[in-house]
Image (tube, coloured by chain):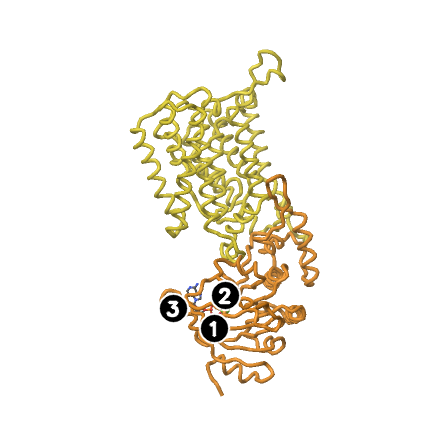
């Protein structure tokens, strides 16, 4: 297999393939540390990054599953906003927080199911079209039910999901300020559950199979439509969880919540190494993709780089990530 | 009435299939006995694959009925036919190329192990069963974990055949199983078909290669423009006659 004439680069490709993204993260961490030695690696800054990416990571995970089936969900930002508004209205209506907590994930699931049913039963030619439609519809409905104004005043218990702190006094001594954000724990648990789902269950395997060749899945007796509906529903569910986390962080629901976050989610998924054409990608890669976007924004903010440059950089990284993938396919021997 | 091994195990009676305004099949019949190899021939577009997809449950027929072991059956998905022991090698192979060989063989029927109320994939068992099955079929691949997209056309064909023979089928339908194969590999597939026949499995083989048909078949039937055109025990016909049938000519 190994050819002596292969350049070092070509022989490195399998390793870059598997560990490249971790390498990229390590390099980014190192650069940011060198540029901001006092601030960057502070407990406060690192927890900040995780708090910022927490709700976005939920959208990315949902969009990832959809992209594995060779689909797309453009509506996740709007689902997040509608779920957030529904939560706020339920909270304002005086429902106990134990109930309000379920409103956002439930509304998210219903929205996701609408996408899934539209794509399969209405036989929309491409999920892009269905979810482009619902991108407008869900945000519109969110504004209709809220009157287009922010709604605040959530119960503390509700907020603790997105902004709770697990203090580390047992580790750092009495009065220590170090803490782990509860949202980080939540997203780690959810990522772990979805890793198991996608890698250790039949349905997870079928999701990848559908992305690889839906006809093969059908010939294998898999009910492709049912799996697709499930995937879009889960994507909506995760967007609802994102809304719950965001509710805790911001303390209010606002009309622009999650605006354009569907694009960030897609970007994170692509940077994380998933194929836009379906059937390929890992849960860990999604987490890495979200983390890289968070690092970039954080680092550039610390250095007071304008948001305009941030846009240029994020765009460049997307293109670079996919270009590496192109090179890999051209030269690479895959696992 | 119990099923007798000399009885017809699978029958299509008056099956028609329309795609919009296209008539792919019109009132076609087919029957198969256990341990019998039926060769099916016909021109491109004659409806061979369509008829087989009806028998495998991938397509729902527009009219007509399917009988299995004498009983009328309705297939709403290939899973229904698989549960009866009908397996199919599709002409386009129907493999998920992004997945490894073993995943493809067991797609939809993955071995699992229980963990409390949950069922998780049993990766070890799948790997073991895959390796055993591949070596039984004398299929050479580097590893059972190789993705199908890394395989040659012939190897892919072998994986599709492996998939159809991994579950103790009663009936195996092969839609042009030798199309992508070199001479030696063709021989292996034809030997495999004879092996299935010896086990009492009913086999339907579609092929454009007269050598295939005349090496393994007991009986040959021809479709022409979506209808039954001719049929004969193999020993009562000749290559020239069968080639004539394909072109719609009877001597
Ligand atoms: N999914 C489909 N949608 C529309 N028309 C179809 C479909 N599948 C088959 N047909 C049509 O049905 C007819 C029979 O096709 P079929 O694939 O059964 O032919 P075949 O005998 O297998 O030919 P070949 O030897 O080329 O494989 C053709 O006219 C084809 O165009
Ligand atoms: Mg055909």
Image x and y of residue A90, in percent: 37, 27
Q: How would you rate the neighbour count of disc 2 (Cα within 10 Å): few for under 14, some for 14-19, many for 20 or more?
A: few
Write the residue at 34% across / 33% down. A142
- Mark yes or no: residue B185 visible: no
Pick whichever of labels 3 and 2 is earlier in the sequence.
3
Work out whether B7 lies above or below A118: below
Rendered view: B117 above or below A186: below
Closer to the camera in the image, A165 or B220: B220
Say if disc 2 is inside 8 Å of ligand 1.
no
Q: Chain of mark 3?
A: B
State yes or no: Cβ of the residue under disc 1 lies below 8 Å from any atom of ligand 1: yes
Task: Quickly name the residue at label 2.
Answer: B72
**Sequence-wise, which precedes: disc 3 or disc 1?**
3
**Image point (52%, 81%), residue name:** B243
- The numbered disc on residue B22 is 3
Q: Which chain is orange?
A: B
**Residues at marks 2 and 1 touching, judged by CB atoms closer than 8 Å:** no
Chain drawn in yellow: A
> In front: mark 2 or mark 1?
2
Residue A198, x across and y down, in percent: 55, 43
* Beta carbon of the mark 3 residue lies under 8 A of ligand 1: yes
Residue that numbered label 1 is attached to: B44
Residue A214 horizontal/vertical position (percent):
49, 54
User: Vertical placement of B81 versus A58: above or below?
Assistant: below
Above-or-below relation of A11 to B214: above
For mark 1, name the chain.
Answer: B
Give the crowd class for mark 3: few <14, some 14-19, many >=20 residues within 10 Å: few
| Residues at marks 2 and 1 on the same chain | yes
Residue B108 placement (x, y as % from top left): 56, 53
């Amino acid at each position: 297999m190994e050819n002596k004439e292969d350049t070092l680069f070509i022989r490195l490709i399998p390793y870059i393939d598997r560990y490249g993204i971790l390498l990229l993260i390590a390099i980014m961490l190192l650069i940011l540390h060198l540029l901001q030695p006092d601030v960057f690696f502070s407990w406060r800054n690192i927890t900040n990054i995780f708090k910022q990416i927490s709700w976005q990571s939920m959208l990315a995970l949902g969009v990832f599953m959809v992209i594995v089936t060779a689909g797309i969900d453009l509506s996740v930002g709007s689902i997040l906003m509608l779920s957030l508004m529904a939560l706020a209205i339920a909270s304002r209506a005086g429902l106990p927080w134990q109930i309000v907590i379920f409103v956002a994930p439930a509304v998210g699931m219903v929205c996701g199911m609408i996408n899934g049913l539209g794509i399969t039963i209405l036989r929309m030619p491409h999920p892009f079209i269905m979810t482009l439609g619902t991108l407008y519809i869900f945000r519109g409905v969110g504004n209709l039910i809220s009157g287009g104004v922010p709604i605040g005043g959530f119960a503390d218990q509700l907020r603790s999901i997105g902004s709770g702190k697990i203090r580390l006094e047992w580790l750092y001594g009495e009065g220590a300020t170090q803490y782990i954000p509860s949202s980080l724990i939540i997203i780690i648990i959810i990522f772990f559950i979805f890793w198991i789902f996608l890698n250790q269950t039949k349905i997870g395997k079928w999701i990848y199979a559908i992305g690889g060749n839906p006809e093969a899945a059908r010939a294998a007796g898999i009910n492709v439509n049912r799996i697709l509906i499930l995937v879009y529903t889960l994507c909506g569910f995760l967007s609802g969880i994102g809304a719950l986390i965001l509710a805790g962080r911001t303390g209010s629901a606002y009309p622009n919540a999650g605006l354009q976050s569907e694009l960030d989610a897609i970007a994170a998924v692509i940077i994380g190494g998933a194929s836009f054409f379906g059937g390929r990608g890992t849960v860990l890669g999604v987490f890495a993709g979200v983390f890289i976007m968070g690092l970039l924004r954080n680092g550039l903010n610390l250095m007071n780089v304008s948001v305009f440059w941030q846009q240029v950089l994020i765009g460049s990284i997307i293109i670079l990530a996919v270009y590496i993938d192109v090179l890999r396919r051209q030269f690479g021997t895959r696992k | 009435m119990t099923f007798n091994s000399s009885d017809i195990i699978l029958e299509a009676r008056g099956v028609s299939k329309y795609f919009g305004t296209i008539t792919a099949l019109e009132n076609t019949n087919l029957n198969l006995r256990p341990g019998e190899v039926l060769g099916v021939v016909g021109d491109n577009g004659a409806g061979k694959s369509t008829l087989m997809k009806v028998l495998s449950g991938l397509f729902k027929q527009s009219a007509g009925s399917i009988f299995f072991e004498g009983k009328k059956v309705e297939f709403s998905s290939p899973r229904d036919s698989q549960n009866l022991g009908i397996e199919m090698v599709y002409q386009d192979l129907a493999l998920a190329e992004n997945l490894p060989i073993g995943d493809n063989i067991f797609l939809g029927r993955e071995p699992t192990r229980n963990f409390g109320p949950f069922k998780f994939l049993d990766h070890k068992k799948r790997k073991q069963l895959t390796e055993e099955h591949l070596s039984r079929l004398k299929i050479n691949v580097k590893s059972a974990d190789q993705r199908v997209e890394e395989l040659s056309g012939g190897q892919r064909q072998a994986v599709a055949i492996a998939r159809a023979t991994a579950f103790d089928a009663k009936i195996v339908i092969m839609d042009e199983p030798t199309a992508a194969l070199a001479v030696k590999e063709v021989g292996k597939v034809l030997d495999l078909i004879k092996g299935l026949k010896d086990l009492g499995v009913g086999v339907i083989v579609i092929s454009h290669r007269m050598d295939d048909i005349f090496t393994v078949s007991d009986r040959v039937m021809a479709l022409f423009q979506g209808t039954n055109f001719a049929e004969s025990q193999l020993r009562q016909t000749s290559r020239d006659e069968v080639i004539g049938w394909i072109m719609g000519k009877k001597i």
